[in-house]
Image: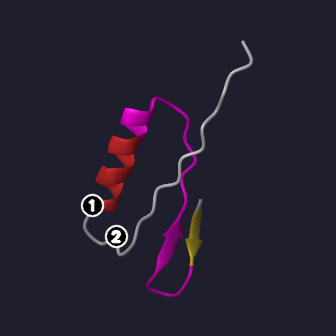
Amino acid sequence: MHVHATHETCVEAVIAKGPYEKLRQFCENTIAEKGVGNGKINYLPIHSEN
């Protein structure tokens, strides 16, 4: 999701599903991008009903 907070600032939210290590790497790389002021990662475990 992409929202314009101000004329010069945007808020981005990404919801993804996948292996923890790949998600962690994606999030850390995204937060490290030039121009990113703040970043936070939240993980929610998903348990299958097998």
Residue at image location 34% in from the left, 70% down from the top = 36
Q: Residues within 10 Å of mark 1 (few under 14, many from 20)?
A: few
Residue 44 position by quadrant:
top right
Q: Main secondary structure of the magenta part?
A: loop
**What whole-number distance in Å separates the C-alpha atoms at marks 2 and 1?**
7 Å
The residue that label 1 is drawn on is: 32
Residue found farthest to the top: 50
Labelled disc at residue 17: none
- Amino acid at dot 1: Ala
Q: Which residues are magenta?
A: 5-23
> In the image, is residue 15 part of the stretch drawn in magenta?
yes
Answer yes or no: do the residues labelled 2 and 1 have beta carbons within 8 Å? yes
Is 27 placed above or below 17 here? below
Which part of the image, by quadrant, shows the N terminus? Answer: bottom right
Report the residue marked by disc 2. 36
Three-letter amino acid code at the position of disc 2: Val
Assign a secondary structure to mark 2: loop
Residue 38 position within the rendered picture, expressed as x and y whole percent measured from the top left? 39, 72
The image position of residue 42, as x and y in percent, is 53, 54
Q: Is residue 3 magenta?
A: no
